[in-house]
Image (cartoon, rainbow, N blue to C red):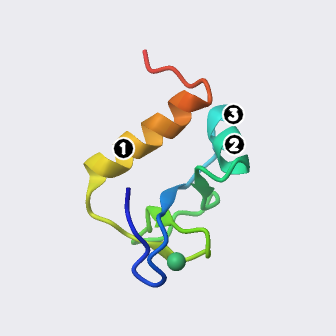
Amino acid sequence: MSLCPECGASGVPLIFGLPAPEALAAAQSGELALGGCLMPRQPPNWQCSGGHQWRDGDEIAFDEQLLTVLAAHGYRMD
Ligand SMILES: [Zn+2]
């Protein structure tokens, strides 16, 4: 979990690149944000419901949140 530095809303993981089907489903239900195929040089990794994007250096929290969301939509890690 990461909070938006601009409005204080809780963020969802922001990912770049071609999304997996599970990621698309998660994005459609608002649990994940898709940044598109072009990754910026210093990519943000969280987005709030207000559309703000920011970078949080806590990669572990990001990975945990991302995997939780993807698993909820049927993604399985081998
Ligand atoms: Zn915000």
Local packing at callout 2 (Cα closer than 10 Å; few below 14, some 14-19, many 20+) is some
> What is the secondary structure assignment of the residue under circle 1?
helix
Disc 2 and disc 1: Cα gap in Å? 17 Å
Res 24 label: 2
Name the foreground residue: 57 vs 9: 9
Distance from Cα at disc 2 to Cα at disc 3: 5 Å
The tag earlier along the polypeptide, 1 or 3, is: 3
**Residue 3, placed above or below residue 60:** below
Q: How busy is the neighbourhood of tag 1: few (under 14 within 10 Å), some, or many (20 plus)? A: few
- Tell me which amino acid carries mark 1: Asp
Describe the element under mark 3 as helix, strand or loop. Answer: helix
Local SS, label 2? helix
Q: Position of residue 65 (x, y in %)?
A: 41, 45
Q: Could you tell me residue 60's position as x and y percent?
A: 27, 47
Q: Quadrant of the rendered structure where residue 63 is?
A: top left
Do labels 1 and 3 touch, CB within 8 Å? Answer: no
Q: Is mark 2 within 8 Å of ligand 1?
A: no
Q: Which residue is mark 3?
A: 21
Residue 63's disc is: 1
> What residue is at 38 percent from the left and 56 percent from the top?
1
Q: Amino acid at mark 2?
A: Leu
Looking at the rendered structure, the number of numbered marks drawn on it comes to 3
